[in-house]
Amino acid sequence: MRSNAIRSNLLVPEVREVMDIRQASDYLGISSDTLYKYASEGFVPAFKLGNRWRFKRSRLDEWMDRQSDQHAASADPLQKKPVRPAF
């Protein structure tokens, strides 16, 4: 029984509370380059630890919930990302 539990842990990657950009991009199902851009623009909740982006899983989950709620209520279903005004 114990060997089955160990084997199942090898198949499922561990999802940590604080993730680096690679782990977070895998979690969200987007490329690292896209996530880096979104973090730099403030579109996704992220913070820097030193010079590296970090992402809290719980904050990303909350953000995804808000995004799905906004998408459901949106009049324009094709808009994927808010457009920032040019200055």
Image (tube, rainbow, N blue to C red):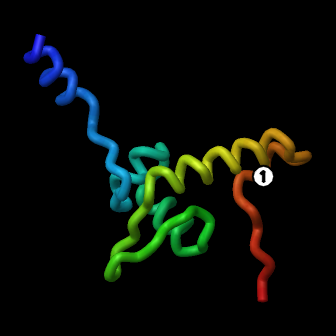
Outermost residue, left side: 3
Q: Position of residue 28 (x, y in %)?
A: 48, 46
Compared to residue 13, the image places residue 33 above or below, namely: below
Indicate the quadrant where residue 9 lies: top left
Outermost residue, top side: 1
| Residue indicated by mark 1 | 79
**Which amino acid, mark 1?**
Gln
Q: Nearer the viewer, residue 51 or 29?
A: 51
Q: How many marks?
A: 1
Q: Quadrant of the N terminus?
A: top left
Q: Position of residue 81 (x, y in %)?
A: 70, 58
**Left or right: 44, with 20 as reference point:** right
Compared to residue 29, the image places residue 19 above or below, namely: below
**Left or right: 78, with 21 as reference point:** right
Q: Quadrant of the C terminus?
A: bottom right
Which residue lies at the image location 49% right of the left edge and 60% below the top edge?
A: 35
Give the SS element for disc 1. loop
